[in-house]
Image: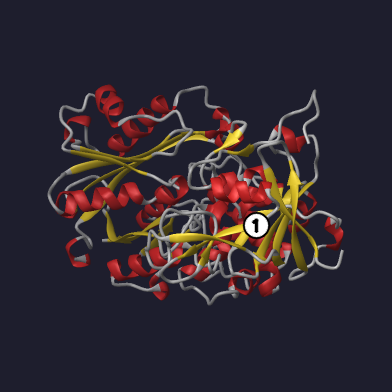
Amino acid sequence: MTEAVRDRAAIVGIGSTRFARNLGKSELENALEASRLALEDAGLSPADVDAIFKVETPGEEGNSELEIARNLGIPQLRAWGAAGYGGGGACAPIVLAALAIATGVASVALAIRARNRGSGGRPWARVGTRVPGVAAFEVPYGLASPVQQIATLARRYMWEYGVTSEDLATVAVVQRFHASHNPNATFRDPITVDDVLTSRVVADPLHLLDCSMESDGACAVVLTTAERARDLRHRPVLVTGVAQGMGKRHYMMGGLVYQDDPFDFPARYTAREVYRSAGLGPDDIDVALLYDVFTPLVLWQLECYGFCRRGEAAALVREGRICWPEGDLPVNTHGGSLSEAYIHGFNHILEAVRQLRGEAFCQVADARVALVAAAPIVPSSAVILTRQ
Amino acid sequence: MTRPDGAQRPLPEITPLTEPFWAGARDRVLLLQRCARCRRFRFPPEHGCGYCGSPEFTWERASGRATLYSWTVAHSPHLPFFMERLPWPVAVVQLEEGPRMVTNLVGVPVERYEFGMPLVVDFLEVDSEITLPVFRPADS
């Protein structure tokens, strides 16, 4: 089955809005702007598009395929769909688009993520006086926000494996260094480990600079068949591996502690599937774009995606291996969610494409294979992209 | 727990599935679902067993013994009720029966939290309907 998808679809255009705390526009307007730029980048027009795939998260204002198609002037859509699970769905629009293109259901697909979380407020804070679902067993005790949920797990992880706050801070420092080369990044001033450790505590043991800042912005990607891609403007970036993943008794991130093994993240399953899909392994990856809403997630993905064993990611970070240009596995070369912008991981896909086109600000020499991984701690997704 | 002029504590919505758990807490008993087929305890309440898929289960009384698995201390931003009480510690405990719960510890300052410390269940009556299971050190 995996052979039927491998290298059949290609990314031929990318586009994004500016990123800021408040762009003063709706999610729909931002989605349209990013889509127009991506089509322009591809040298295609809205008349070529016949599929749209997106991510949707409850609590966001949203932007429907119907509105996007109408406002771009798309004459006919043959396929569409929205993946769920927020940050875990970051790569899912690419997965769905690749499936639609590989099967001939669609010929040109737009994959879009628009998110006004900077100006739009925090969904977790909109809880009423009565809390429904699994959160009914968490919020009344004061475990309400993602950073609190991850902090609880991070403390246990740090204790089990001897990981320090300095190790977590190093992730933020490395990514800020990358962002200092990226004129589109929200935060470009280099920081030190001490800056992270002296930033205020948000949820102990996590500091402010262990967290990404909520942003407004939108990103879009244009995909078509590998054959058609050869006649377009840019060197095609092939969608070589695609995957979604969740496992037995999995929960959203507030519920990770209910699992028999809280560190049996959905990313473990996603990793296995994306490597199988691509016919590649961790040693083949030249650059990794990992979901980094909080610093511990980067360590957990380095382990889940097989770059080291469980509990060993901090050593890999200490050895400088994730830092461009010296490291052998540069991670989040655009600055990631921690420094470029938090578009729920979708901006990481654009960076992977820039790397494989040879157009990145922190260009990895001769980058041929890029891994993009979505949020590891909720039902997840990933893609492996390669240079043709 | 609620000051007349302060924010209200967010409380659980009670459903037919979760009602026995909260009724037990009102009676100062910690109840857990137990699968009728594979006999595993589970928490939080679910309609079917995540281990074996069986829809059949019973509610059984837990021993109330637990150990401290992890914790955080929340600072700003938080929900209004907790914002008025920062910093706010939250604990995760591992029950003797296997499942873990999110909870609060009573009778011990956060500076004295230790991984694996033995705990026993206690109950915090919020109002006539809701009592929250909490935990305190076993030696207190």
Front residue of this view, candidates B103 and A105: B103
The image quarter in which residue B138 lies: bottom right
Q: Residue at x 25, y 28 (%)?
A: A69
The vertical placement of A132 against B99, above or below, is above
The image quarter in which residue B31 lies: bottom right
Q: Quadrant of the N terminus of chain A?
A: bottom left
Using residue A238 as the reference point, say whether residue A139 is left or right of it. right
Front residue of this view, candidates A131 and A227: A131
Front residue of this view, candidates B34 and A146: B34
Q: Position of residue A323 (x, y in %)?
A: 58, 64
Using residue A367 as the reference point, say whether residue A13 is left or right of it. left
Using residue A378 as the reference point, say whether residue A326 is left or right of it. right
Residue count near mark 1 (Cα–Cα under 10 Å), binned few <14, some 14–19, many ≥20:
many
Front residue of this view, candidates B70 and B35: B35
The image quarter in which residue B49 lies: bottom left
- Specify whether residue A367 is in view: no
Q: Residue at x 20, y 28 (%)?
A: A74
Label 1 chain ID: B
Q: Position of residue A84 (x, y in %)?
A: 39, 45
Q: Quadrant of the C terminus of chain A?
A: bottom left
Q: Secondary structure at mark 1?
A: loop
Q: How is the image coloured?
A: secondary structure
Q: Residue furthest left?
A: A104
Using residue A93 as the reference point, say whether residue A311 is left or right of it. right
Q: Residue at x 59, y 69 (%)?
A: B98
- Specify whether residue A115 is in view: yes
Q: Which residue is mark 1?
A: B30
Q: Position of residue A236 (x, y in %)?
A: 26, 53
Q: Please state which amino acid type lies under the numbered disc 1.
A: Leu
Q: Position of residue B89 (x, y in %)?
A: 76, 51
